[in-house]
Image (cartoon, grey):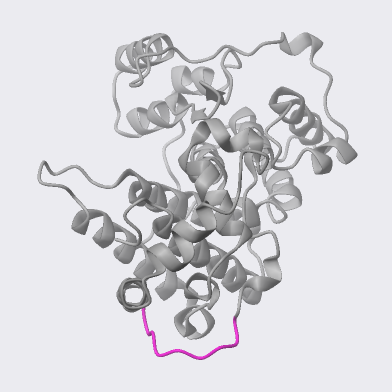
Amino acid sequence: MQLIKPTTNLRSMGSLAQALLSDKSFDIEFQGYLSNHVKHAIIALDRLDAPASRLQGYWDEYTKLTPYEIPLHKVEESWDTVKPAISEEWNDWRGKKIHWQRQAAFMDDELSRLDNDTNKLVKQYAPELLSGMAGALTHGVIHLGWAIDAQSPWMICEGLSYLNFCHLGFEDEQVLDFETENDDSAPMDSFIRVANTFEKEELLESWVNKVKKSYDKSFHPELVPAGFQWELSKLFKEPHQVATVIPKWIRQCPLPEIWEELYHAVVGLYLASRDQNGNGNFVVLHLITSLWGLEKTMRVLEPPEEVERKVLGQFYAMTITLLGASAAGFP
């Protein structure tokens, strides 16, 4: 599989698509925890050369009635009156799911300060946010990836502010173990080993369910309405070494090979987890799109090799924890 990097010359977005991606009418979430996907679809349709009428028709229908049979939530305050956050507030509000409009306005101000250079904005703010990419079931990094692909300045502001807004990851980043040796040579080796370990050590009961029962609604109260996201946050609070021991392929394999093998593994896992009607696991589906969004982000960041490996380690640990958090345990 040949990976297409953001530096590849893609056709510019059409004028209608650009206008829709710049729209500021709707909140980044609705119903308190559901992510707004409408702009992702607009980019996909435009990349497929769909006519303008199809783009506008999709926008009109989705904003009025999402697949959840409720409309998108319009922003509560006119952008003209929104007071942008300041740096201290940006840091203090991280992961608290409050004041998204003010955070997005802060990113917009920062973009102006950086001479409207979106790469500079991503390089300044994304590195400290990627540790929390599990937030909103990875939709922050998904949104940012779509935005980078479309080269949409406002959508990049949305994506960065969404990552900050919903930031969720291991409370102690030092918990990730890059030193312990193991024999895994590729992502699928790790997935098979983890699945066997889940069964052998009965981790669904001894780790997942035990931790889930250890916290009441005073823990991450902002996530309680989201259900699964709340349960996931508990496992990030008390992680297990089955997720936090980073396999040797992340430490040793060439980076292009790691990306390619990760894509193969998560797509393979998605296909293998389909039910009798052919429907795939939506959590695994998010792993595919978040990996793509993360790769788009990393190609803008152009970090040192050791930093990229650390981020891939975070993605791996998040993947195992996310999959293990389901009611049935690791697939």
Of the pair 48 and 185, the residue shown nearer to us? 185
Query: What's drawn in magenta, residue-wise?
Result: 178-186
Q: Residue at x 38, y 29 (%)?
A: 41
Q: Quadrant of residue 44?
A: top left
Q: Is residue 257 above or below residue 210?
A: below
| Residue 299 seen anywhere in this rendered image of the structure | no
> Residue 97: x percent and y percent?
67, 33
Q: Quadrant of the N terminus?
A: bottom left
Q: Is residue 182 magenta?
A: yes
Q: Is residue 92 above or below residue 212?
A: above
State left or right for residue 291 relative to residue 86: left
Of the pair 261 and 219, the residue shown nearer to us? 219
Q: Quadrant of the C terminus?
A: bottom left
Q: Is residue 209 above or below residue 33?
A: below
Q: Residue at x 53, y 40 (%)?
A: 136
Q: Residue at x 16, y 47 (%)?
A: 275
State left or right for residue 126 relative to residue 210: right
Main SS, magenta residues: loop
Q: Residue at x 57, y 45 (%)?
A: 135
| Residue 66 seen anywhere in this rendered image of the structure | yes
Q: Is residue 123 magenta?
A: no
**Label tally:** 0
